[in-house]
Amino acid sequence: MKRILFALSLAGVLCGGSTTWAETDHAASAVLTTSHHAVLDTDHNTSHPSDPALNTDTADNNTATAVDESSNTATTALDHGDTAWVLSSTALVLLMTIPGLALFYGGMVRKKNVLSTMVHSLVAAAVVSVIWVVIGYSLAFSEGNAWIGGLDKVMLGDLHPDTLSGSIPEILFVIFQMTFAIITVAIISGSIAERMKFGAFVAFISIWVIAVYAPIAHWVWGGGWLMHDGALDFAGGTVVHINSGVAGLVAAYMLGKRMGFGKESMAPHNLTLTVLGASLIWVGWFGFNGGSALAANGSAAYALVTTQIAAAAATITWLLVEKVVRTKASVLGGASGAVAGLVVITPAAGFVTVTGALWMGLIGGIVCFWGTTRLKQLLKVDDSLDAFGLHAVGGIAGAILTGFFASHFIMGDDAPVGLSGIMHQVYVQVIGVVATIVYSAVLTAIILKVIDLLIGLRVESEDERMGLDLSQHGERIE
């Protein structure tokens, strides 16, 4: 109960107002959880739940002794169910970017910039895929130090198809993580839409995924300092959403506002595409969060439920707030609200109860509406498609709220206990948020400045008026 009141107070501060909330009781059932995204030692010895040696109902003393020895020495075996689930999840996460995010962003820009906006997602998938296997995965998930991984797995080293990461092939873990890197980079394109050179964007993402994404992924998931400090991030609240949203904000500032911003209409040209994109993103997020359990088990199933509830709750609150503030609940608002809820629950999906997910979704819809409206005005930035307002603001709220709502029912002894435990977890979460913001902002600014000096970031004024579809790609929608 204290967690809910504390969290709601925080949301009130974030939204710039005060709200009185009714009390409710937590109700949850216990669910077995697995450690998420940790770098798994493929030589680690542990017993597998399906090991027949574990059944000792009719065993004699000698068999019991053999069972004990087997429990201590058996090597983790390939689990076909886990493998099938993560294979499916990998496809779902890639679906979030191509075509999900491409459609979501493509529908929100003006007609003359549709193709140039959609190709950002496509080229992100292509460029990041190559860089990830060459060096990105090694920097993020091989043994190194507290800040960065090593070079042991450059070009995937001697990674054999039979090499395991937990109960799945490590090569599967490689491509599952690749899809996370892809969508992180693609999200940034929402902040720079309609004015950045295509070549500059390709150069930027090529460097950024190595210099920014891989180190932060290592901090949180690859055995780095935030992981050792106990930071909770089930599926990428910091690594993906805060990281990309902050990078997008910095890029928007450095590029400057679009020509005519605030003076002429920049209404979305086709919200049908945006709704289709948001729908695909919502479906794909089941792989994003559910797949992050890295197993076909109760933790994955519970993550699906919390994901659905948070997305639904945020959609409702966004539409309600929009109705009150603007007198009409918009289609774009509904799509944005769904994404907001999905972002907020991402760091917490495998750590909170359904009750916690409901509250996080309700809070997330309000906070992200504020982030894309009032905060955007205060920052005086042209964040074209609200990458910062949705992903960074939602990611920050989700990361901090995870500290409040992390549940003993789900996490067992790993959950924070008592007020002091909760406050310590919130402190660790805040440290992770601040570190991600600072590192992402500084490195993004440096990378963009270097590219600007070498080839320039922004298209010429005449090209911008013409539209980037024609000026950058020689094509247009008739």
Image: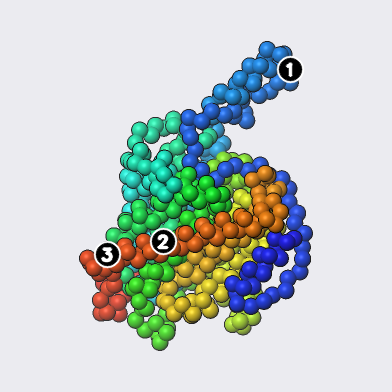
Q: Which residue is mark 3?
A: 450
Q: Are marks 2 and 1 in contact (CB under 8 Å)?
A: no
Q: Which SS class for mark 3?
A: helix
Measured in 3D between alpha carbons, the distance from the residue under mark 3 to the one under mark 2, in whole angstroms, is 16 Å
Which quarter of the figure has residue 150? top left
Label 2 belongs to which residue?
Answer: 440
Q: Could you tell me which residue is drawn at 26 percent across and 68 percent down? A: 452
| Pointer 1 with pointer 3, Cβ within 8 A | no
Please state which amino acid type lies under the numbered disc 3.
Val
Q: Label 1 neighbourhood size at 10 Å, few (<14), some (14-19), many (20+)?
A: few
Give the label, 2 or 1, closer to the camera. Answer: 2
CA neighbours of label 3 inside 10 A, class few (<14), some (14 to 19), many (20+): few
Q: Identify the mark nearer the N-term, 1 or 3.
A: 1
Residue drawn where x is 50% and y is 70% of the image:
389
Residue 57 picture location, percent across and down:
74, 21
In the picture as drawn, the residue positioned furthest to the bottom comes out as 263
Mark 3 vs mark 2: which is more N-terminal? 2
Point out the frontmost of discs 1 and 3: 3
Would you say 53 lies left or right of 211 here?
A: right
Residue 354: x and y, percent? 69, 55
Viewer-nearest residue: 302 or 220 = 220
Q: Label 2: few (<14), some or many (≥20) within 10 Å?
A: many
Q: Nearer the viewer, residue 328 or 225?
A: 225
- Taking the image as shown, residue 226 lies to the left or right of residue 359, namely left
| Above or below 147: residue 438 | below
Residue type for callout 2: Ser
Residue at screen point 66% across, 24% down: 54
Q: Secondary structure at mark 1?
A: loop
Q: Is residue 193 visible?
A: no
Q: Which residue is mark 1?
A: 58
Q: Tell me if I can see residue 64 in this picture.
A: yes
Q: Is residue 93 left or right of residue 322?
A: left
